[in-house]
């Protein structure tokens, strides 16, 4: 009896203790509870000082949680092409870890050139796994700023000139990243279209261009991709810096689009405490004392949203309504990432990731020109190949700004070609030109010694000598990721090739008829020698597997299928921003601010070229194949539709060549008559189809009201006007294969 009584008492005490413990367990720790309820519970337990601490950095890439409540820190990492090596807590110097060498994925211009949302999903999933493995909360990417000028040093990080293409490619990237419990951070919101004077440029742009050209990819990221964070840009718009901009952040992003995530400042992008409080910024990051200027180390309490904000609250100059909204958003991000127990574990620098990087590179490489079918290289009939150019050996994963990486390996183009043709073809190499011989960026050392003191004549003479009797000459040049080329914080001075490369190519073309020019860049270049060489390849910055990806295209292991995500102009003055003297803006009198008027309005890229009847060097959407595709006669489900209807356009595509290949079928829409001026045509659909020799597939496009609409700046809404439209189907914006008319009632 005593034993039973004792047992009953023990059970009662155990149950009572358990109930008391459960009652004390915070709801925010219980993942079975709705996330909004968890947010409110955590918010109610935080002190004012804890809230202020959470909305600004505590280290170069970290902001604090609340240790007392078990709320973890936020850790960011630079993207969008790979996971940045670790730096010291409060310095940019490398932390010198031995296990942070990552997979370098191709630059986003290459991803956009695949025109394949499934490849974008693979990219996002793979890089998200690497970020998760390193326990990062936020991946600072992708970038979707529009390619407005080929001088922009950061174009290589973005997805081209067309808002529809960028919108369709950014969404799966975000979904892939966030499937790993890591927040994507779409940047740079908004109008950050050149690096020159990026901190002081005030963009003046009409509302139509803003909504039709520069905002759609961000809108898609929010409303279709459900992105968890967005980074404000350095520049100004409406005379307010974009990191605390009432119109962009509050009116459009949060109210109009319904964004429920975190707005993060670019590093040093905050300039004013009062605007940071009220104008939509949630989390302040920076580099120095106040996020802007050199100063005392470890002085994060001096940030605009740190002690200055706390002081205003304590003096009752401002309330806590905005602060609580910022904390809710930050907590929501934490619950979605670090405090999500179902988060996968991720993986890092795996064979699967290197294969993904290679596949992305292979599908993004663009065959621009192939006269006389010089490519692919006929290995059986080839004895000697001369490879010329510094970019054949120079590492491209190091440099370029915040996207610089410490890659586990990087296969150079020369290494890739030698590996693929080993014991089959003699490969000889000559430098041809000397560009940048530096071997370090932000503490990452390439261990390459590229110093060469020979004269330009000596270098060209050597290249000519080894090329004269070669079966093929592969010139591998272009830009690099040094300041003033494809690099953050500076723009190019022109679109000409640097380092005397044009003369090298001209000289090679006089001694060998089979010169293949491989341009490595994230930007368009001028090609004064375009008619003198039979083959040209746009190879981008391809990351860890660069050489292997390029070699597979050169020898035909992979049939090229990439298409240009931006126009190659023949001359800089063929670009609207330069023809109209808009770039880089005009400095205000007695001020550091530079006003840059986007005088070309909605006419960016191919839209401008077609309006002005300018023939591009290579058109938007252009890209050749080693096979041939035949476009059949399109059919349409109805020739009349209303704004509540859709119609379907179908066209047969047949591979009439002898090789398997992929074609990107592009749909453009032309409004034959509208109240406001519109481009001659605009991209409104695309599909990439893989076809075996002789195979036919039917490609269908659905046209709805959104496909026909333009932004009416007077009404501040999208309008689809009744009238006649034309569906235009092509293999590029220039190569039109079929047209079909319909009417909107």
Image (cartoon, rainbow, N blue to C red):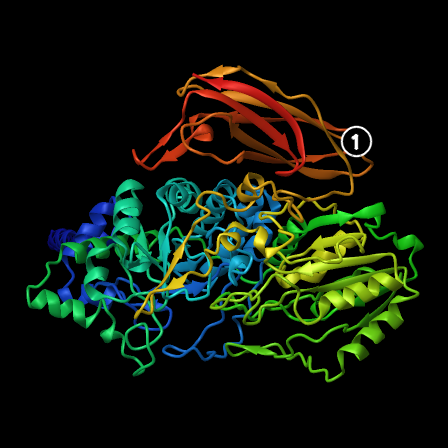
Give residue 729's position: percent from left, percent from top. 62, 30
The residue positioned 53% from the left and 41% from the top of the image is 607
Q: How many marks?
A: 1
Question: Could you say which is closer to the camera, residue 464 or residue 261?
Answer: 464
Q: Quadrant of residue 418?
A: bottom right
Question: Circle 1 sits in a helix, a strand or a loop, which is it?
Answer: loop
- State whether residue 21 appears in this view: no
Quadrant the C terminus occupies: top left
Q: Quadrant of residue 132?
A: bottom left
Q: Nearer the viewer, residue 727 or 538?
A: 727
Q: Residue at x 91, y 66 (%)?
A: 468
Q: Horizontally, is 63 left or right of 156 in the view?
A: left
Q: Position of residue 218 (x, y in %)?
A: 40, 47
Residue, disc 1: 656
Q: Is residue 145 left or right of residue 239?
A: right
* Percent position of residue 125, x then y: 51, 51
**Residue lying at 72% horizontally and 54% vertically, measured from the top left:** 537
- Looking at the image, residue 153 lies above or below residue 177: below
């Amino acid at each position: 009896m005593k034993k039973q009584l004792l047992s009953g008492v023990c059970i009662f005490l155990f149950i009572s203790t358990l109930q008391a413990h459960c009652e004390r367990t915070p709801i925010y720790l219980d993942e079975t509870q709705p996330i909004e309820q968890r947010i409110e519970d955590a918010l109610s337990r935080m002190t004012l000082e804890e809230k202020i601490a959470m909305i600004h950095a505590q280290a170069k890439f970290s902001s604090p949680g609340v240790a007392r409540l078990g709320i973890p820190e936020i850790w960011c990492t630079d993207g969008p092409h790979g996971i940045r090596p670790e730096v010291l807590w409060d310095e940019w110097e490398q932390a010198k870890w031995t296990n942070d060498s990552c997979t370098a994925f191709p630059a986003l211009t290459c991803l956009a050139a695949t025109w394949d949302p499934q490849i974008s999903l693979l990219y996002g999933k793979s890089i998200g796994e690497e970020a998760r493995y390193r326990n990062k909360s936020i991946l600072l990417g992708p970038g979707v700023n529009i390619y407005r000028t080929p001088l922009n040093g950061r174009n290589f990080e973005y997805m081209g000139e067309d808002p529809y293409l960028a919108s369709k490619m950014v969404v799966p990237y975000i979904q892939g990243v966030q499937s790993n419990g890591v927040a994507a951070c779409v940047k740079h919101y908004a109008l950050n279209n050149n690096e020159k004077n990026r901190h002081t440029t005030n963009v003046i742009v009409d509302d139509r261009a803003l909504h039709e050209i520069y905002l759609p990819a961000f809108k898609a990221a929010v409303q279709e991709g459900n992105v968890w964070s967005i980074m404000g840009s350095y520049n100004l718009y409406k005379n307010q810096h974009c990191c605390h901009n009432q119109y962009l952040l509050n009116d459009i992003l949060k109210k109009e689009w319904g964004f429920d995530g975190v707005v993060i400042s670019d590093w040093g992008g905050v300039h004013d405490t009062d605007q940071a409080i009220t104008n939509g910024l949630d989390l302040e990051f920076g580099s120095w004392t106040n996020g802007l200027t050199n100063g005392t180390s470890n002085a994060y309490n001096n940030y605009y949203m740190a002690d200055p904000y706390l002081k205003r609250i304590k003096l009752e100059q401002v309330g806590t309504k905005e602060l609580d909204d910022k904390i809710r958003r930050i907590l929501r991000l934490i619950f979605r990432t670090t405090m999500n127990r179902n988060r996968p574990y991720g993986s890092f620098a795996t064979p699967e990731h290197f294969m993904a990087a290679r596949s992305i590179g292979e599908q993004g490489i663009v065959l621009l020109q192939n006269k006389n079918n010089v490519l692919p290289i006929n290995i059986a009939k080839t004895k000697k190949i001369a490879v010329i150019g510094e970019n054949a050996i120079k590492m491209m994963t190091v440099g370029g700004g915040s996207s610089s990486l410490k890659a586990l390996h990087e296969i150079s183009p020369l290494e890739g070609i030698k590996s693929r043709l080993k014991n089959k073809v003699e490969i000889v190499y000559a430098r041809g030109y000397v560009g940048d011989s530096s071997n370090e960026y932000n503490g990452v050392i390439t261990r390459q010694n590229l110093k060469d003191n020979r004269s330009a004549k000596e270098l060209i003479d050597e290249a000519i000598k080894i090329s004269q009797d070669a079966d093929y000459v592969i010139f591998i040049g272009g830009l690099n990721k040094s300041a003033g080329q494809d690099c953050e914080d500076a723009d190019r001075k022109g679109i000409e090739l640097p380092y005397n490369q044009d003369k090298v190519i001209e000289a090679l073309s006089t001694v060998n008829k089979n010169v293949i020019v491989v341009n490595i860049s994230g930007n368009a270049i001028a090609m004064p020698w375009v008619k003198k060489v039979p083959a040209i390849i746009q190879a981008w910055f391809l990351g860890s597997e660069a050489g292997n990806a390029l070699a597979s295209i050169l020898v035909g292991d992979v049939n090229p299928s990439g298409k240009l995500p931006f126009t190659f102009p023949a001359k800089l003055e063929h670009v609207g921003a330069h023809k109209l003297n808009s770039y880089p803006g005009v400095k205000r009198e007695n001020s550091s601010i530079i006003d840059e008027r986007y005088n070309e309005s909605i006419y960016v890229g191919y839209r401008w070229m077609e309006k002005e009847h300018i023939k591009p060097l290579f058109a938007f959407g252009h890209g050749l194949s080693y096979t041939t595709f035949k476009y059949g006669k399109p059919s349409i489900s109805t020739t009349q539709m209303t704004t509540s209807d859709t119609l379907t356009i179908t066209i047969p595509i047949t591979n009439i060549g002898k090789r398997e290949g992929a074609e990107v079928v592009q749909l453009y829409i032309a409004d034959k008559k509208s109240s406001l001026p519109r481009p001659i045509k605009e991209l409104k659909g695309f599909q990439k189809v893989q076809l075996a020799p002789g195979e036919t597939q039917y490609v269908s496009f659905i046209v709805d009201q959104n496909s026909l609409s333009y932004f009416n700046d007077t009404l501040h809404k999208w309008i689809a006007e009744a009238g006649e439209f034309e569906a235009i189907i092509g293999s590029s914006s220039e190569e039109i294969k079929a047209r079909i008319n319909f009417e909107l009632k």
